[in-house]
Image (spheres, rainbow, N blue to C red):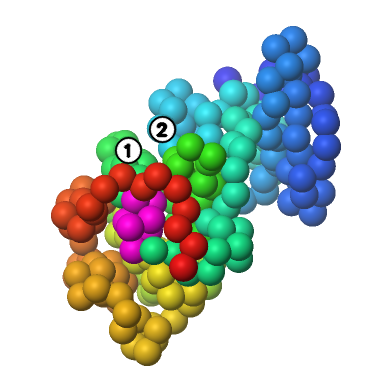
Amino acid sequence: MFDSMLPLSYYRKVADLSAEHNVSVVQHIESHKICIRKTMQIYSLPVYEQLFYNPVKGLPRIYAMYEAPDHSSLTVIEEYISGDTLKEVLEICGVLSEQDVLSYLNQLCSILIQLQSFTPPIVHRDIKPSNIILTEDGRIVLIDLNAARLDDKNRSHDTQLIGTVGFAAPEQYGFAASSPRADLYAAGILMRVLLTGTDAKDDMLSRHLSRKIRAIIERCTQLDPRKRYPSAQALQRDIRKLMHKEMKGISCS
């Protein structure tokens, strides 16, 4: 199904986004729609197949794919998302308000709920500020699925670290097999970074946070996956309890 380069031929290159990572901006020759083209050496074809046929709200839509005959690379044409990454937002604004962070995490949970609803579930494995784009209308979009894998309950441990140090759950270092709870660990670290500016647990920096916020972060980031939230739905329930109103913009602290 994805062994023909013909679908890719309908897109012409406009500019390089990252020559080092083989990411470029392309345009459909008929519709003139702007998209992203990227070629990956590390990828899971079953993940991309699932998302090609079953788009997830909050992820870039996949329009075309091509896998090399020797299975050494996968080229994907996907939706172009306009906005700033949460890493860029942090650099501009500094730490964010609890209200904004709760709004972003509520949206992230909605995305993870969809990923966890697949059979087997999809584990993103690289949730971090630079992989989340905030659009002009306040939506977040989770990008970069290079590290994503299908949950495999028969696997005893991860064979290599795929993810980002500081955000990757302990099991992603080979201590156990990463499961959907690895993404909940990263979500907790993400909350801490957005609210304090660091991924490290620092009681001095965290003391201004509400007790309930600290409790959510603490549960997400338990070293033992069994002690974390059991699902994105459970995390979202606690987040929604703390939300006072919908986010209407970025609040720079």
Q: Position of residue 196 (x, y in %)?
A: 43, 75
Residue at the disc numbered 1: 114
Reply above or below: 208 against 10: below
Instruction: Give the residue drawn at x 48%, y 77%.
Output: 198
Three-letter amino acid code of the residue under disc 1: Gln
Three-letter amino acid code of the residue under disc 2: Val
Relative side of 66 to 221, left or right: right
Q: Earlier in the sequence, mark 2 or mark 1?
A: 2
Report if the CB atoms under discs 2 and 1 are less than 8 Å apart.
yes
Residue 201, picture quadrant: bottom left
Residue at the extreme top: 30
Residue at the disc numbered 2: 56
Few, some or many C-alpha atoms within 10 Å of disc 1 (few <14, some 14-19, many ≥20)? some
Few, some or many C-alpha atoms within 10 Å of disc 2 (few <14, some 14-19, many ≥20)? some
Instruction: Give the residue drawn at x 20%, y 75%.
Output: 211
Majority secondary structure of magenta residues: helix
**What separation in Å lies between label 2 and label 1 (alpha carbons)?**
7 Å
Residue 27, picture quadrant: top right
Q: Which segment did they paint magenta?
A: 98-105
| Residue in the foreground of this view, choosing between 42 and 29 | 29
Q: Quadrant of the N terminus?
A: top right
